[in-house]
Amino acid sequence: MMYHRVRFLAVPLLALLCLATTPEARANGLSVDGVWARPTYGTAKVSAAYFEITNKGSRIVQLVSIESPAAANAELHTLVMDGDIARMRQVDSIDIAKGEAITFQPGGLHVMLMGVKESLIVGNSIDLTLNFAHRPPMSITAVIAVKPPTRARGSF
Ligand SMILES: [Cu+2]
């Protein structure tokens, strides 16, 4: 079955990812960089994670969910204006057209992390798994920070 061949190919790809020193991940024409999440303070159990995802592949990619071992729940959210008030709305899925880059950032799309299990401290990091329709999941690492990390340069 094709599935076995795909799994076999995934091993050298993972090895490459381990060599990367910046929070950037690539797989199957997808690249994700600038991954960060907000720290939590006091007893707060809520955080948000952000990144830029670029589809350099030949077909549309649909991001359907995100999960993290660091939080009980992770949801895709966007901010919509309701008069003067910005409200968060859950998004079912996000389509990334071929050649398109989508940025999750404060004031817009974000990953809402709820039920954060341990305080998120600046300088630490957490793992996130991106789940897609019709393709394998992708693991990325978010640095805990108060602002976006310096962009990784695409050098390979
Ligand atoms: Cu939210």
Image (spheres, grey):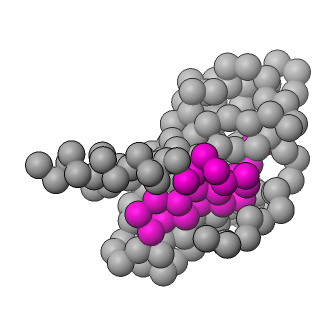
Quarter of the rendering occupied by the C terminus: bottom right
Q: What's the residue at 81%, 57% (across, down)?
A: 148
Place of residue 138 in the rendered image (x, y in percent of width and height, measured from the top left): 47, 48
Taking the image as drawn, is residue 50 in sight?
no
Looking at the image, which is closer to me, 14 or 68?
Answer: 14
For residue 143, what is the image quadrant? top right
Q: Please provide the residue range marked out in magenta.
A: 16-40
Give 54 or 96, whichever is nearer the viewer. Answer: 54
Q: Position of 88 compared to 12: left or right?
A: right
Q: Position of residue 72 (x, y in %)?
A: 56, 24
- On screen, residue 85 above or below 156: above
Above or below, comparing residue 53 to residue 89 in the picture: below
Say which residue appears at 61% left-offset and 27% top-offset: 71
Q: Position of residue 76 (x, y in %)?
A: 54, 48
In x, y percent, where is residue 34?
A: 72, 59
**Which of 62 and 25 lies nearest the eye of the viewer?**
25
Q: Is residue 33 left or right of residue 3?
A: right
Picture residue at 57% right of the left edge, 27% below the top: 69
| Residue at left offset 69%, top offset 44% | 142
Is residue 32 in the magenta section? yes
